Amino acid sequence: MNASIENTESFDPIIPTHIMQDTHLNELADCEIYLISELCQVTGSFKFRAAWNVVNQVDAPGFLAASSGNFGQALACAAQMQNRKCTIVMPDKAAKVKVDAVRKYGAEVDLVDTNIMSREQRVLELSKSLPDYYVSSAYDSEHVINGNASLGIELADAIPYIDAVIAPVGGGGLSSGIISGLRSRDIDMSVWGAEPSIANDAARSLQNGTLISNDKEPDTLADGARTISLGRLNFAILSHEMSGVIEVDESLIGVAMKHLHQCDLRVEPTGALSVAALFVETKQFAGLKIGCVLSGGNVDDEVYSSLIGL
């Protein structure tokens, strides 16, 4: 798929991704690993790429979105930069560090018990009282996909010679964007997804060739993957362009975080899925050059310490 990358304002706060290599992980996974780190991105995750594009492309006084945290704080930050308002619906179990960050950027936070009502249902309710606000999906949006395509373009320019990229999958906005950016540069690099096995709607959807939803938001450590399903726009791209989705056991998320900690990288559970996937598919990637996207580093101190054994 060729991406139609949208233009943004001349001021561009997006920080180019950091690409690192680490011998300890190379030996562990028996492949040449390129760590593609979005940890130093504005608001600490790749989500700012999408949020910045949304705010730049949409003329609205305010923005409304559902988020587990990273898109929420990214959208709140982007809106604040443009002196516009923002309301974010978050699960009441969201990481405190993410809730606090959304509020720090001046946005309203609406917490919801997802066992009673989904975030999307609450957004629909709030939109009736905020009719001038633009409702943005965190992933199922052309603006979001085009914003995330900037990462794919950077990879095409920086490491076009690697064999494959593995990216965490929740709603599919990141992997769809990476694919769109790569294809816009005529780079036919393989792109794989990594998702928790208890939240494997993407894997099941690609296997069955139809969009499949979870019954409820999965209770996985990887809060960025607690989505009901892939977005429809994302599925249209991934069903044709993604090489496959690797299912990761919850126990491997902490293992990957520990190894990344040894590389002096503080990665949140969702961000560690790409490295955890290497421990599942060691034979698939043996001897190859593999890029692992570390999608974010926003995690509560207590959760982080417990998972890496501090």
Image (tube, helix red, strand yellow):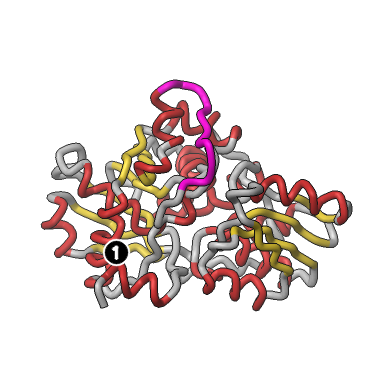
The residue segment tinted magenta is 208-218
Q: In the image, residue 45 lies at what x, y percent?
A: 49, 64
Q: Quadrant of the C terminus?
A: bottom left
Q: Residue at x 38, y 45 (%)?
A: 195
Q: Nearer the viewer, residue 278 or 114?
A: 114
Q: In the image, residue 121 lies at what x, y percent?
A: 71, 45
The residue wearing badge 1 is: 257
Q: Quadrant of residue 28?
A: bottom left
Q: In the image, residue 147 lies at what x, y percent?
A: 59, 52
Q: Is residue 209 magenta?
A: yes
110 to 160, vertically: above or below: below
User: Can residue 177 be seen from the camera position used here?
Assistant: no
Q: Quadrant of residue 50?
A: bottom right
- Tell me if 24 is positioned left or right of 267 in this view: left
Circle 1: is it few (<14), some (14-19), or many (20+) Cα within 10 Å?
many
Q: Disc 1 residue type?
A: Met
- Tell me if 282 is positioned left or right of 102 in this view: left
